[in-house]
Image (cartoon, helix red, strand yellow):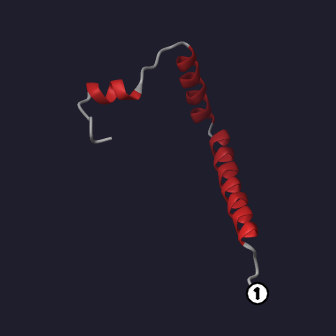
Amino acid sequence: MPLLTAEEKELLTKAASLMGELLETLEVMQDKKLVKELRIALREVDEGKTRPLDELVRELNLEGEI
């Protein structure tokens, strides 16, 4: 008889993934410079200072490479 059912294995895998995401979030939150840069980037998105990725790819002649 297996120690864990397929359902339990799936739940454990999801929990481990969530823990990894939480640890990564905590690492980012501790980097004050990075948090400041993220806030600036989000503000620029809100202000419409961005453009679509496919436009940039075309401009750099990277079609088919990305």
Q: Kindly give the residue lying farthest to the bottom in the view shown.
A: 1
Which is more toward the observer, 15 or 64? 64
Q: Is residue 2 above or below residue 45?
A: below
Q: Secondary structure at mark 1?
A: loop
Q: How many numbered discs?
A: 1
Residue at image point 26% right, 35% down:
62
To which quarter of the image does residue 56 belong? top left
Q: Is residue 60 above or below residue 9?
A: above
In the rendering, at what x and y percent does residue 38 appear? Answer: 57, 29
Which is more toward the observer, 49 or 31? 49
Residue type at the position of mark 1: Met
Which is more toward the observer, 53 or 44? 53
Give the side of residue 39 with respect to residue 19, left or right.
left
Which is more toward the observer, 7 or 56? 7
Q: Which residue is mark 1?
A: 1
Locate the N terminus and report the quarter of the image it occupies.
bottom right
In the rendering, at what x and y percent does residue 3 appear? Answer: 76, 81
In the rendering, at what x and y percent does residue 35 appear? Answer: 62, 32
Residue at image point 57% right, 35% down:
34
In the rendering, at what x and y percent does residue 36 appear? Answer: 60, 28
Give the side of residue 1 with respect to residue 42, left or right.
right
Residue at image point 54% right, 24% down:
41
Q: Is residue 61 above or below residue 51?
A: below
Crowd rating for badge 1 (residues with CA inside 10 Å; few <14, some 14–19, many 20+): few
